[in-house]
Amino acid sequence: MGLSLEDIRRALATLPDNRTPTAKDGAALSTLWRDDLNARIAYLERLRDSLTGCIGCGCLSMENCPIYNENDKLAAEGPGPVILELIGTA
């Protein structure tokens, strides 16, 4: 799921000692991760949807390519997949 062991440890530490967690406990834990997981799902959907025009194309057309980043101008926006992240904010 992409959760760190530390995230899981902190969540499990909120459970009461000396009893088996209930369904209510599990529901409470799941809410801790719901927003983060929904954001990851949306990000992956944007990635999936943006790949349609690129995979297998091979063109890297300077005029038409949605991922072309002339002279790395997007470096000023920060590291990582800046174009994909910008798509999510438009």
Image (cartoon, rainbow, N blue to C red):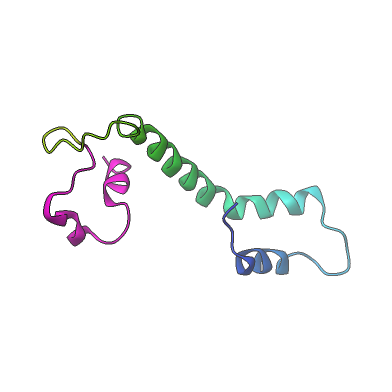
Position of the C terminus, as image quadrant, is top left
Locate residue 78 relative to residue 9 in the image: left or right: left
The foreground one among 63 and 39 is 63
The foreground one among 38 and 45 is 45
Locate residue 72 relative to residue 29 in the image: left or right: left
Q: Is residue 74 above or below residue 56?
A: below
**Residue 79, position as x, y percentages in the image:** 29, 61
Instruction: Name the residue: 30% across, 34% down.
Output: 54
Instruction: Name the residue: 70% across, 48% down.
Output: 27
Instruction: Name the residue: 11% across, 34% down.
Output: 63
**Residue 59, position as x, y percentages in the image:** 21, 34
Instruction: Name the residue: 28% across, 52% down.
Output: 82
Is residue 79 covered in magenta? yes
Q: Is residue 28 above or below residue 90?
A: below
**Residue 56, position as x, y percentages in the image:** 34, 31
Locate residue 27 relative to residue 64 in the image: left or right: right
Q: Quadrant of residue 80?
A: bottom left
**Residue 29, position as x, y percentages in the image:** 67, 55
Locate residue 8 relative to residue 78 in the image: left or right: right
Q: Which residues lie in the magenta part?
A: 66-90
The foreground one among 79 and 60 is 60
Give the total number of marks visible in the rendering. 0
